[in-house]
Image (tube, helix red, strand yellow):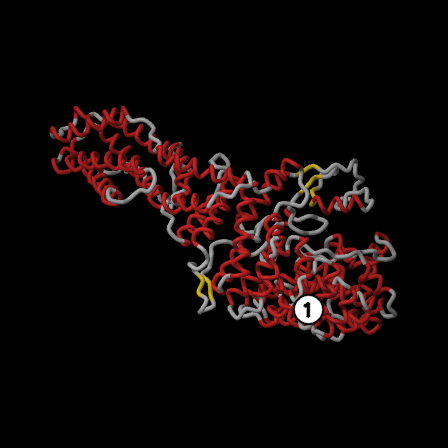
Amino acid sequence: MASGAIFASLRRRRSPTLDAFLAPVDLSDVALVQTLVAVAGELVSCFSKRPFFFQSKNSRSLIRKVEVFQLLLEYLSDSGSGACLPPTALLCLKELYLLLYRTKILLDYCAQSSKLWLLLQNHSISGHFHDLNQEISTLLDVFPIKDVRLSKDVREQVELLQKQSRRAKLFIDKKDDALRIRFFSFLDEFEKGQIPGSAELQSFYVDKLQILDASGCRNEIDALEEQIVNHEGDIEPTISVLKGLVAMTRYCRFLLFGFEEDELDLEGGSMKKSKRRLITQEIAETFLTVPKDFCCPISLDLMRDPVIISTGQTYERSSISRWMEEGHTTCPKTGQMLGHNRLVPNRALRNLIVQWCSAHGVPLDPPEVLEAEAFASACPTKAALEANKATAALLIQQLANGSQFGKTIAAREIRFLAKTGRENRAFIAEAGAIPYLRNLLSSHNAVAQENSVTALLNLSIFDKNKSRIMDEEGCLGSIVDVLRFGHTTEARENAAATLFSLSAVHDYKKVIADRTGAVEALAGLLQDGTPRGKKDAVTALFNLSTHTENCVRMIEAGAVTALVGALGNEGVAEEAAGALALIVRQPIGAKAVVTEDEAVVGLIGMMRCGTPRGKENAVAALLELCRGGGAAATERVVKAPALAGLLQTLLFTGTKRARRKAASLARVFQRCENASLHYGGLGVGYALASNSAPTRDTSYAGDVSVPMSISVPVL
């Protein structure tokens, strides 16, 4: 389907697409005429009988003009006049070739685009028809009709077309424009908090626009959402208006057509895949390597609200604000003294991050704290919020009283509605969706279960909803049951991701770990799941490992064994090493890790071949293993082959954190009775490290590096 941007390019005489036709410069006169006859004939045959819901008069008028050109071209071809055309006529025919192609693009656009989008673009598209009419008029004025042998009938037809084209004015269908104005009036009513009546909406959508079923309505929504994704800044309406129109149309989809007609296959337990992205920011990030410049140097997470401090370094606003609130007066990255505490938004970097997220399908929620002007632009309009609230009320009512089929559809739509926007997540939970979604977690229908657990995952991203989910009786247990016995792989994975999201609250880490089967299921998913499942599981286990009271539970549940095994999996090794580094801070955890045959070997392997983050976590885990595991653990680490060279490499080429950890580990070895025997070759490096580092490593748990949004307490 052509896009609106094509016509802007056509007006500026740019080639609209890579497969665009070029004017045939190397054809003979006869071949050129024959080619044009074929192109014009194809246009007439394709569009002369095709119905046009909008732009009908403009389309018919343009097709009639093409029919006159077809008559002219067929006469030139049949009579042989095309073999001796004057140069001016040839130039006009080559220009006609391009005009016919652009006519095809415009007619295709009007025939295939969504009704609502054509309605919104009514003035703009009418302008494109007028542009083509003007260019046809110019071409006919230049065409040397008197110098070309034509029959009387053909000449009269061409001259009549010439006169009509000169008189042609911009035509905007009044009925179409009245519908467009009515469409916006509905949006104004939502903006004022007034929900239009169902009779009015049915008259507009069903009677006038002929959107007759749920499938047609859903196609219109998808088309508008596609325009939002591909929106260009100079195209009307704005994104905020489009979002309001999408929300209003989604409300009408359920108000007018109910819940029974859809693409769900309940008997087969499957659902046709939607083009819409279903997962949230935190889950999407686990699949991608975020560019280093887009990550905050403090949290190592993708920045939502990058700001510049006085030293010129950029950080995530929340991270650097917390740093300053703790009393620090230096730049975390450079160590320079801060000249002032003002934070300047880095809008250029923010725009690059937005573009990268859009290109890779990563949803980017608005930051929690923004300047007033930026926040206003990021927030949805009141009309969109009111329409979404009205939709949520219909969906929750269906969850409460609908059929099994209707409940499944309602859960899916809440899943969609909750995937973006704090406001959406807030009012869905406030309206009482969580108890009904909890009930669906135990459904025997795979689609219903998958949609409900994913909806809870998306809702849990909003911090206040975490407590609502945890306080709902039986909800945590049901999520764990889905993790253990879920009908589909995606349901089990999203249950693990939900536990990860909920465990961001420190008080819930212990509650989750103590839930029967939770840690065991996460450990099993880490060992036997899909790549995404392993990622979901390891991030959840990392969060749980930050609570000191969970150590024994994780050992008993086999999480340590699973984490050690994950050290050999490139996709989850960094997080696994980070979790182990936290577990071995406690003596019981260190003893459990050291009994795993592959633990030290796996960590050494990460120091050799891992990413910078992986090396940091590996050396941190080895250091804590020596500190908490006693002499036996230290001896096992010391005897690891090739460790000497790897430590020396980290001391001089590793990141700042890795060097600090390596220096501390070297000092531990120096205090060992046989350190000089095993590591005599490192004396110089250790001496340098000892002179440049404090006598005691004061690193925090925050030095354990993971590429996700994880709150790690200072220990």
In this orientation, does residue 41 appear? yes
Please count the marks in the image: 1
- In terms of secondary structure, where does tag 1 sit? helix
Q: Is residue 457 left or right of residue 690?
A: left
In this orientation, does residue 570 appear? no
| Residue matched to label 1 | 563
Q: Position of residue 104 (x, y in %)?
A: 30, 41
Residue 151 lies, with reference to residue 434, above or below; the image says above
Residue 83 lies, with reference to residue 400, above or below; the image says above
Residue 13, picture quadrant: top left
Q: Position of residue 566 (x, y in %)?
A: 65, 68
Residue 236 lies, with reference to residue 423, above or below; the image says above
Q: In front here: 23 or 370?
A: 370
Q: In front here: 632 or 214?
A: 214
Q: In front here: 49 or 655?
A: 49
Q: Position of residue 410 (x, y in %)?
A: 51, 58
Residue 171, picture quadrant: top left
Residue type, mark 1 in image: Leu
Q: Is residue 20 left or right of residue 508?
A: left
Q: Position of residue 650 (x, y in %)?
A: 74, 58
Q: In front here: 239 or 537?
A: 239
Residue 698, picture quadrant: bottom right
Q: Quadrant of the C terminus?
A: bottom right
Q: Residues within 10 Å of mark 1 (few under 14, many from 20)?
A: many
Q: Is residue 665 left or right of residue 16?
A: right
Give the residue displayed 25% in from the left and 24% down from the top: 141
